[in-house]
Each structure stands twice: as C-alpha cells, then as structure tokens.
Image: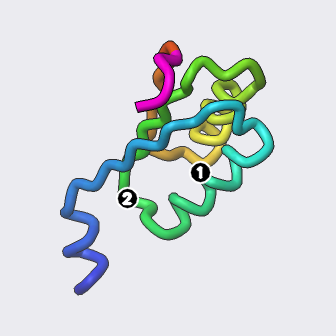
Amino acid sequence: MTSTITESINIAVILPAYNEAQTISQTIESFFAELPFARIVIINNNSSDATKSIAEETLQRLGCRGLVIDEMRQGKG
C-alpha cells in the first residue's frame, strides 16, 4: 500500500551541476534508485566538461523522467 501512495505523489528535484562529468551518472542512478517515480531537473551551469551529455545519456539509459537545462553561470548568490 505504501508504494501506491508514494507513486501518486508528484516529486521533482532540481539538481544544479557544474563540471560534474565524473559524478553525475552515479548521482542520477542513486537518486532514481531511491525515488524511481520522481522527476529530476538537472540545471547544467555552463559546464566545460561532458556533464550535460552524460546526464542526458544516463536519463535515457535508465528510462527516467528527467530533463537537462542549460543555464549560463551568473556567479555566486
């Protein structure tokens, strides 16, 4: 019964990412292992590495509900 209740709840997590090519795939996999019914929005903060492509490939490979958005860096705060 618990899984039915949790699957009916809409959950989305916003994950900022900047040059996380080494860790983004594992982060996404861990997130969906815990909340497979949730949606993840990854804000790629103008990374100079392969963060965006790795995140997109991981979401597609896992068949996850997610989105990668490119955002220009605007500094701290």
From the viewer's perspective, is the residue at label 1 or at label 2 nearer?
1
Question: Which amino acid type is marked by label 1?
Answer: Ile
Q: Nearer the viewer, residue 29 or 23?
A: 23
Query: Is residue 18 toward the left or the right of residue 42 in the image?
Result: right
Residue drawn where x is 26% and y is 84% of the image: 2
Query: Which quadrant of the figure has residue 38?
Result: bottom left
Q: Which residue is mark 1?
A: 28
Q: Residue 74 location, x and y as percent?
A: 47, 17
Cβ–Cβ below 8 Å for labels 1 and 2?
Answer: no
Q: CA distance from mark 1 to mark 2?
A: 13 Å
Question: Which quadrant is the N terminus positioned in?
Answer: bottom left
Vertical placement of 68 versus 10: above or below? Answer: above
Q: Residue 18 location, x and y as percent?
A: 63, 32
Query: Is residue 38 toward the left or the right of residue 56 in the image?
Result: left
User: Is the magenta region chiefly helix, strand or loop?
Assistant: loop
Vertical placement of 23 versus 34: above or below? Answer: above
Q: Residue 7 location, x and y as percent?
A: 27, 66
User: Is disc 1 surrounded by few (<14), some (14 to 19) or many (20+) residues within 10 Å?
Assistant: some
Magenta stretch, residue numbers: 73-77
Q: Which badge, 1 or 2, comes first in the chain's sequence?
A: 1
Residue drawn where x is 43% and y is 64% of the image: 35
Query: Which quadrant of the figure has residue 29?
Result: bottom right
Say the numbered circle drawn on residue 37: 2
Question: Which amino acid type is marked by label 2?
Answer: Phe
